[in-house]
Amino acid sequence: MLQQVFDQLCEERRLAKKDREQREFLAMELFQVCDDGTHDEADLLRALSKHRRQ
């Protein structure tokens, strides 16, 4: 499930596989949100979606 969320967020943010630093930062953000108690796929996407921050 985390891989699906990560892949979806990478696509949303247009992060190519070569954007290693940005992808690693996103992975850390995803793990932090999960560690904070969010485990539902939709909630993780909402928490980290760029659209939410605008």
Image (cartoon, helix red, strand yellow):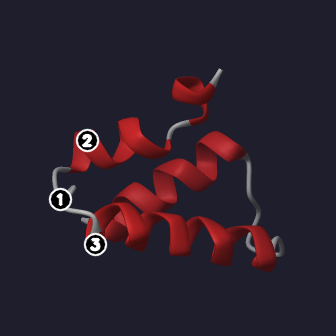
Q: Residues within 10 Å of mark 3 (few under 14, many from 20)?
A: few
Q: Residue furthest front?
A: 36
What residue is at 48 percent from the left and 45 percent from the top?
48
> Relative to residue 17, is residue 40 depicted above or below?
above
The quadrant the N terminus occupies is bottom left
Type of amino acid under label 3: Asp
The residues bearing labels 1 and 3 have C-alpha atoms spaced at a distance of: 8 Å
Q: Position of residue 40 (x, y in %)?
A: 16, 50
Q: Is residue 47 above or below residue 33?
A: above
**Amino acid identity at mark 2:** Asp
Residue 35's label in the rendered image is 3
Name the residue nearer the viewer: 33 or 40.
Answer: 33
| Circle 1: element type | loop
Q: Earlier in the sequence, mark 2 or mark 3?
A: 3
Residue tagged by mark 1?
Answer: 39
**Place of residue 32 in the rendered image (x, y in percent of width and height, measured from the top left):** 41, 69
Q: Which image quadrant: the C terminus?
A: top right
Query: Callout 2 environment at 10 Å: few (<14), some (14 to 19), or many (20+)?
Result: few
Identify which residue is drawn at 52% across, 65% down.
Answer: 29
> How many labels were placed on the picture?
3
Identify residue type, mark 1.
His
